[in-house]
């Protein structure tokens, strides 16, 4: 099956009023800040130890390994973000720093190609002995992704060659008899190996990834019996007996119908399954991907694109179990969902996958980072009462304000690499046809067989559903276009010089019948603010409503609506009022609504319970985009609100 291609990032220049707030932070704030954290130079932030670990493993300094077993991945994701940023903003000093880090990784590489500072420093004899918890293959996967990105952008092959040696070792080791059923405990190496195969043309890396996927969940189950190996040492002391579904090895992946276990592991595995389905023309594997995606999106996903609703074990639970205040919904899991959805759209050309990718990006992924780029959410609740987010309670994983860094810091660098590679989400291509997935301002060059065309988007999306699309083909080579029609779009039209162009809408894309060399098209659709409701099976949202506009989910914040947001009732019979304001949150569309609120008036403060209801008072409500919450000093927040009809 033929996969639509991503455009090279170097051909995409984004300049978008909505996204600039974040994408411009990548080079100016996020990458430099994360470099400081990797070097443990940010006061009051949890130390990372990342660079120090590599220095110790390389024999450049005395010391020991510190941090989580997968600490090396933070360096990998940082390097991946650096690579992407260099594609659109060359920076010689930053590239020099990255080259030095790559040399350091090379020095920490063992003679046989192995790279992992935890095992190299602390337990070299226990290499590969605990795949369930050891994260060596997970770490390898992120380093492979970074190496491929760095090679693609800079053309330098040093990092790629370092990682190719490691990948060769992985292929050798995991084809040995004793590892012939072995699979990674935390999936990710599959994605890295697939990318390495694509960039080197060496199919053996793809085959290794496919073996890992096809072995998974088959009996005898390697991860279940692995601890019988005398070299196996327990790494996570507080983890209860191994639950195969936690690592998605409860049954062969082709037979899996529901999204189970740790949500980041799951989505990274689904990404690899989708890639492999396309590479091997494997319909059975693609069908499994479709079933799993449907299960997530129809039954196990928050309206914000968050997934993994359990605070314990960061995992999927059961259909419709979507609690709002104690959920996990890790930022990385939504990034995984966006990556999986993008791959499914590339394969199927179905825009419904982009709707979900967009939902994850515009809501949970963006909420994961503060507007100054310096603090982050790992856990993404849809409802917060800061006072009850107490340690040693079932709420202790919920942080009511963003944190500067985390001991386990997978999310911040993952958000950085996602923002730095945002261009890869905007378009697909095949030959001379450009698929426009996201309406997002910027200029893009589409390389065609005998020349190139420049495509420019100008839009105020997601606050307005109107985009000017200018196509300029210097060589006169015509371009064909497929424009996404989002599920929320009303009255989708394309006009040229005021005249409507006929379009053929199929699976969420409008295929334009003509070809274009030099023209300006106007894409218009309405996306008014709307009140939406959850499936009645979602117990947590029963009797509640949420407000959305286009891809944006809105929320109430204490800063605008006072405290006790749980006592607010939205009056759904009254119209919503949209108002764009430059003065709030860097410029945004807020939504005003009418409602009522439980009052403390007349209630005896010494009385916890009484036989009369509290007074309901009229109140004006202000909703802001969920992605912007906690940028005004904390306080309560709620996406779902009780409603009156
Ligand atoms: Zn994370």
Image (tube, rainbow, N blue to C red):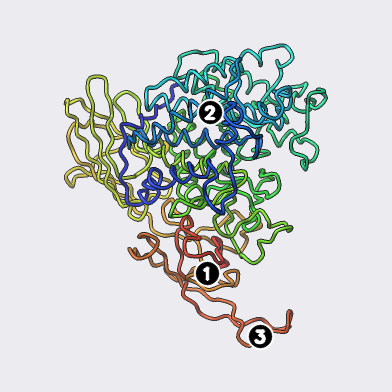
Between the residue at mark 1 and the residue at mark 3, the CA separation in whole angstroms equals: 22 Å
Q: Name the residue under label 1.
A: 558
Q: Can residue 357 be seen in this view?
A: yes
Between the residue at mark 2 and the residue at mark 3, the CA separation in whole angstroms equals: 60 Å
Q: Answer above or below: position of 578 versus 62.
A: below
Element marked by disc 3: loop
Q: Which residue is at 25% across, 45% downward?
A: 468
Q: Name the residue under label 2.
A: 143
Occupied quadrant, residue 171: top right
Residue 498 in picture, x, y percent from top left: 18, 47
Asked whether, in this view, residue 384 is left or right of residue 5, the answer is right
Q: Do the residues labelled 2 and 3 touch (CB within 8 Å)?
A: no
Occupied quadrant, residue 94: top left
Q: Answer above or below: position of 467 versus 583.
A: above
- Mark identifier at residue 603: 3
Mark 1 vs mark 3: which is more N-terminal? 1
Residue 614 in picture, x, y percent from top left: 64, 81
The residue closer to the viewer here, 361 or 75, is 75
Crowding at dot 1, Cα within 10 Å, few <14 / some 14-19 / many 20+, comes out as: many
Closer mark to the observer between disc 1 and disc 3: 1
Question: Ligand 1 closer than 8 Å to the CB at disc 1?
Answer: no
Crowding at dot 2, Cα within 10 Å, few <14 / some 14-19 / many 20+, comes out as: many
The residue closer to the viewer here, 324 or 385, is 385
The residue closer to the viewer here, 170 or 527, is 170
């Amino acid at each position: 099956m033929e996969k639509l291609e991503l455009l090279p990032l170097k051909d995409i220049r984004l300049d978008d009023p909505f996204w600039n707030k974040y994408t411009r932070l990548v080079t100016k704030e996020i990458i430099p800040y994360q470099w400081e954290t990797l070097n443990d130079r940010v006061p009051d932030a949890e130390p990372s130890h990342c660079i120090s670990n590599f220095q110790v493993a390389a024999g450049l300094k005395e010391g020991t390994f510190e941090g989580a077993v997968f600490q090396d991945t933070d360096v990998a994701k940082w390097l991946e973000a650096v690579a992407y940023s260099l594609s659109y903003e060359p920076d010689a000093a930053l590239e020099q720093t990255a080259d030095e880090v790559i040399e350091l990784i090379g020095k920490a590489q063992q003679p046989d190609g192995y790279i992992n500072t935890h095992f190299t420093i602390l337990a070299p004899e226990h290499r590969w002995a605990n795949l369930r918890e050891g994260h060596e293959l997970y770490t390898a996967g992120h380093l492979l992704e970074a190496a491929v990105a760095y090679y693609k952008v800079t053309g330098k092959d040093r990092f790629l060659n370092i990682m190719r040696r490691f990948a060769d070792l992985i292929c050798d080791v995991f084809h040995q008899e004793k590892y012939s059923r072995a699979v990674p405990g935390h999936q990710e190496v599959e994605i890295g190996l697939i990318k390495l195969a694509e960039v080197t043309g060496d199919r053996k890396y793809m085959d290794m990834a496919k073996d890992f996927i096809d072995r998974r969940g088959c009996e005898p189950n390697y991860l279940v019996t692995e601890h019988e190996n005398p070299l196996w040492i327990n790494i996570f002391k507080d983890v209860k007996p191994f639950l195969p579904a936690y690592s998605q090895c409860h049954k062969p992946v082709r037979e899996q119908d529901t999204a189970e276990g740790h949500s980041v592991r799951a989505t990274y595995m689904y990404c690899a399954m989708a890639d492999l389905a396309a590479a091997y023309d494997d319909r059975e594997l693609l069908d499994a991907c479709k079933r799993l995606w449907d299960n997530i999106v129809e039954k196990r996903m928050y309206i914000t694109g968050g997934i993994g609703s359990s605070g314990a074990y960061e995992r999927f639970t059961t259909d419709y179990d979507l609690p709002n205040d104690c959920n996990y919904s890790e930022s990385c899991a939504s990034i995984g969902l966006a990556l999986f959805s993008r791959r499914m759209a590339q394969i199927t050309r179905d825009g419904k996958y982009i709707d979900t990718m967009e939902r994850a990006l515009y809501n949970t992924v963006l909420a994961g980072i503060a507007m100054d780029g310096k603090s982050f959410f790992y856990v993404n609740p849809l409802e917060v009462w800061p006072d009850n987010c107490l340690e040693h309670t079932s709420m202790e994983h919920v942080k009511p304000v963003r944190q500067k860094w985390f001991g386990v810091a997978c999310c911040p660098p993952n958000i950085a690499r996602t923002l730095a590679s945002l261009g890869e989400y905007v378009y697909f291509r095949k030959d001379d046809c450009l698929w426009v997935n996201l309406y997002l301002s910027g200029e893009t060059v589409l390389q065609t067989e005998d020349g190139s065309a420049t495509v420019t988007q100008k839009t105020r999306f997601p606050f307005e559903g109107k985009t000017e699309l200018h196509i300029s083909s210097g060589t006169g080579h015509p371009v064909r276009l497929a424009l996404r029609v989002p599920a929320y779009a009303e009255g989708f039209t394309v006009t040229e010089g005021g005249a409507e162009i006929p379009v053929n809408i199929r699976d969420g894309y409008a295929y334009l019948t003509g070809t274009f060399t030099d023209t300006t098209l106007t894409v218009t659709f309405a996306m008014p603010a709307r009140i939406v409701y959850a499936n009645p099976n979602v117990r947590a949202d029963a009797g509640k409503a949420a407000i959305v506009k286009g891809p944006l989910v809105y929320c109430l914040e204490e800063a605008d609506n006072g405290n006790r947001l749980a006592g607010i009732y939205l009056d759904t019979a009254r119209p919503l009022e949209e108002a764009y304001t430059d003065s709030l949150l860097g410029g945004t569309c807020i939504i005003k609504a009418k409602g009522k609120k439980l009052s403390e008036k007349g209630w005896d403060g010494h009385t916890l319970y009484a036989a009369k209801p509290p007074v309901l008072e009229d109140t004006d409500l202000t909703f802001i985009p969920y992605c912007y919450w906690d940028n005004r000093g904390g306080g309560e927040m709620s996406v779902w609100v009780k409603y009156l009809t």
